[in-house]
Image: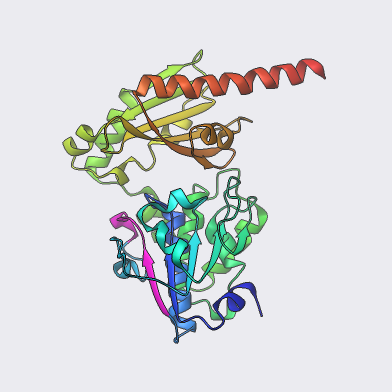
Amino acid sequence: MGILTDVLEQKKTVVILGHVNPDGDCIGSCLGMYNYLRENFERLSVSVYLEPMGKKFGYLAGYGDVKHDFEPDKQFDLCITLDASDEKRLGAFAPYLETAGDSLCIDHHITNRGMGRVNVIASGASSSCEVLYGLLDVRKISRSVAECLYTGIVHDTGVFKYSCTSKKTLEIAGKLIEYGIDFPKIIDDSFFMKTYGQLKLHGKAMLDSRRILDDRCIYTVVTQEELKEFGCTVKATDGVIDQLRMVEGVECAILLYETGNPSEYKVSLRTNTDLDLSRIASVFGGGGHVKAAGCTVTGSPVSIVDGICEQIRIQWKEAEEKQAGC
């Protein structure tokens, strides 16, 4: 018996949770697990709770079954968390983990210290979908499950171009293709396609961007007013950070966008260098990976960026001292 089968033993009700503002990997892993359990464990009653998701993921089986509102009277035998590095990242649905009879945490974030009774955390994996694939019986994976897992891997690897992509990642992606999924359409529709409003929002974000720290870093800010102006939701900011990261000469890209709460901003960080962004994000109560991390910070955009820059300088100085000592 495998880890998943062991955890599911004698369970009747299961809740699946992911992180706030769910991205492709979060949605793919949660719905991948949801479809796998429904198709292979008919005795289980399975629910998924996530914040509203991008419409571009509507092709995934189970998309319409996801619940978006917390129900305080609900309690489950088992809570499975996917792609969430800590309890805070579960948002309003965190109480389901606290009250569940048992818990399983599946993740790939280096900052995840384990929040379940059983923890499967592979910080070297490209995505939570890659980790989840390793827990499933490949003979029982359907096309619907394969579509979910492939979607998550595509999004967290930037279509297999980020450094987190490994030989194992590509091998798993190849195996998922064998289930008959329309992988070109998945990539085009969920990763590259943008609405006209989203294109204009991205253009505004780039026009308003500023290079700092001797042009080695770049940042931009997206406001709630701009989202309304271009008829977009916060999901439309997907891809902005990657555009910033690709600017020639940039070592670290920073995106801030207003959450809607007073002076509160979500911060996304990306780097092409040896900077440890998970370490920087943790200073501000966030987390993530070495080359991609994030946090939520209260303050003015200038003060937030100044604080991040100070942490970048600290790491640069440490690197210089280490090199000088060699």
Residue 65 lies in quadrant: bottom left
Q: Percent position (x, y) of residue 83?
A: 50, 55
**Residue sitting at 47 percent across and 55 percent down?**
25
Its colouring scheme is rainbow
Q: Residue furthest bottom?
A: 43
Q: Is residue 50 magenta?
A: yes
Question: Measured along the vertical axis of the image, is residue 41 above or below residue 130?
Answer: below
Q: Residue 145 location, x and y as percent? A: 47, 71
In the rendered image of this protein, does residue 322 appear above or below residue 142? above
* Residue sitting at x 77%, y 15%: 324
Which residue in the rendered view is the most extreme toward the top?
A: 214
Region in magenta: 45-57
Question: Residue drawn at (33%, 55%), measured in percent from left and top?
Answer: 51
Q: Is residue 128 found inside the magenta-colored segment of the image?
A: no
Query: In the image shown, does 12 or 321 lie closer to the viewer?
Result: 12
Please indicate, yes or no, whether residue 163 appears anywhere in the rendered image.
yes
| Residue 137 in view, yes or no | no
Residue 54 placement, left or right of 164 = left
Q: Is residue 121 above or below residue 88?
A: below
Q: Residue 303: x percent and y percent?
A: 40, 20
The quarter of the rendered structure image containing the N terminus is bottom right
The foreground one among 49 and 138 is: 49
Q: Residue sitting at 30 percent across and 65 percent down? A: 71
Q: Residue furthest right?
A: 326
Q: Quadrant of the C terminus?
A: top right
Give how far across and how far down residue 171 sits, in percent.
Answer: 63, 62
Q: Would residue 1 appear left or right of 31 to someone viewing this image? A: right
How many dots with numbers? 0
Residue 255 found in image quarter = top left
3 on left or right of 299: right
